[in-house]
């Protein structure tokens, strides 16, 4: 089949996010200007550079969802106001809590409490970490990029941030390397589906001129 996104796909659900998959889950904790804590998972999340280490995530409307009373995601609003956030890695053991934190509650709703998670202080930023997660990235806001949007829809806002602090629980290390089988990170597929990251293979990048 072939379709133009503007014309619709004719399938039971939008296939787009099932095509680009799996995707890392950005489990973002932030603080509002008044100190209110927010925690939410984002499936449009990734690393984008080594030096300095930087990450991006995008908050916008779901497929086909038009604007309503809240023009922006709370995470985006908070980060633009305070300049900081923490990404906590979502794992198999935390899958239910991660899902509960996705609830579309009011700005003063505490997703940590709702999901039964523990707030743990960060070292360099004010938003708390998810204590139960084995890896955290403490991030400083760099810029917002307003992506193309459709009329009468939420704005698509991409947040760019520098990673200024990294926490790694030694329980997920093997010989000094993060072991995917110990970490058991989960990733977003399409629709309501997720993947457990455990099976993997290793490929050495060819070197010039030795492997030419």
Image (cartoon, rainbow, N blue to C red):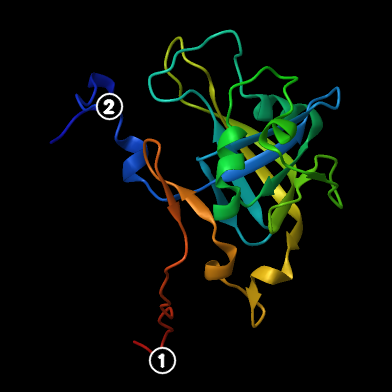
Question: Relative to 183, is 16 on the left or the right?
Answer: left
* Residue annotated with mark 1: 210
- Using the numbered discs, state the Cα–Cα distance from disc 1 to disc 2 in whole angstroms: 45 Å
Front: mark 1 or 2: 2
* Whole-percent x, y for residue 4 in the image: 22, 27
Q: Is residue 91 in view?
A: no
Task: Decide if residue 115 is on the left or right side of residue 194.
Answer: right
Q: Please, is residue 191 above or below residue 5 in the view?
A: below
Task: Name the residue: 58% across, 68% down.
Answer: 182
Q: Position of residue 21 (x, y in %)?
A: 38, 48
Marks 1 and 2 in Cβ contact (< 8 Å): no
The residue that appears at 83% across and 24% down in the rendered structure is 33
Q: Quadrant of the C terminus?
A: bottom left
- Count the labels in the image: 2
CA neighbours of label 1 inside 10 A, class few (<14), some (14 to 19), many (20+): few
* Any part of residue 211 in sight: yes
Please name the residue shown 41% across and 78% down the image: 203
Crowdedness near tag 2: few (<14), some (14–19) or many (≥20) residues, C-alpha within 10 Å: few
**Front residue of 210 and 20:** 20
Residue lying furthest bottom in this view?
210
Name the outermost residue toward the left: 1
In the displayed structure, does residue 75 sit left or right of residue 195?
A: right
User: Considering the image in quadrants, where does the N terminus appear?
Assistant: top left
Which sits in the foreground, 47 or 198?
198
Q: x, y (%) of residue 91?
A: 58, 54
Task: Please indicate whether residue 31 sits to the left or right of residue 10 in the image.
Answer: right
Q: Which residue is mark 2?
A: 5
Q: Which mark is residue 53?
A: none
SS label for mark 2: helix
* Residue at the spot 68% in from the left edge and 53% down from the top edge: 133
């Amino acid at each position: 089949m072939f379709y133009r996104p503007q014309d619709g796909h004719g399938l039971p659900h939008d296939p787009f996010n099932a095509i680009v998959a799996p995707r890392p889950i950005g489990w973002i904790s932030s603080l509002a200007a008044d100190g209110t804590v927010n925690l939410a998972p984002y499936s449009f999340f990734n690393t984008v550079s080594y030096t300095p280490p930087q990450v991006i995530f995008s908050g916008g409307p779901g497929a086909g969802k038009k604007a309503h009373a809240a023009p922006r995601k709370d995470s985006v609003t908070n980060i633009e106001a305070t300049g900081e956030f923490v990404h906590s890695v979502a794992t198999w053991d935390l899958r239910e809590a991660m899902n509960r934190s996705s609830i579309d509650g009011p700005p003063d709703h505490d997703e940590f409490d709702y999901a039964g998670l523990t707030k743990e202080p960060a070292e360099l930023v004010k938003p708390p970490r998810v204590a139960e997660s084995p890896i955290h990235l403490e991030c400083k806001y760099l810029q917002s990029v307003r992506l193309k949007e459709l009329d009468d829809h939420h704005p698509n806002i991409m947040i760019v941030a520098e990673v200024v602090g990294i926490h790694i629980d030694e329980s997920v290390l093997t010989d000094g390397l993060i072991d995917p089988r110990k970490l058991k990170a989960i990733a977003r597929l399409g629709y309501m589906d997720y993947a457990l990251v455990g099976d993997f293979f290793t490929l050495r990048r060819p070197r010039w001129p030795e492997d030419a």
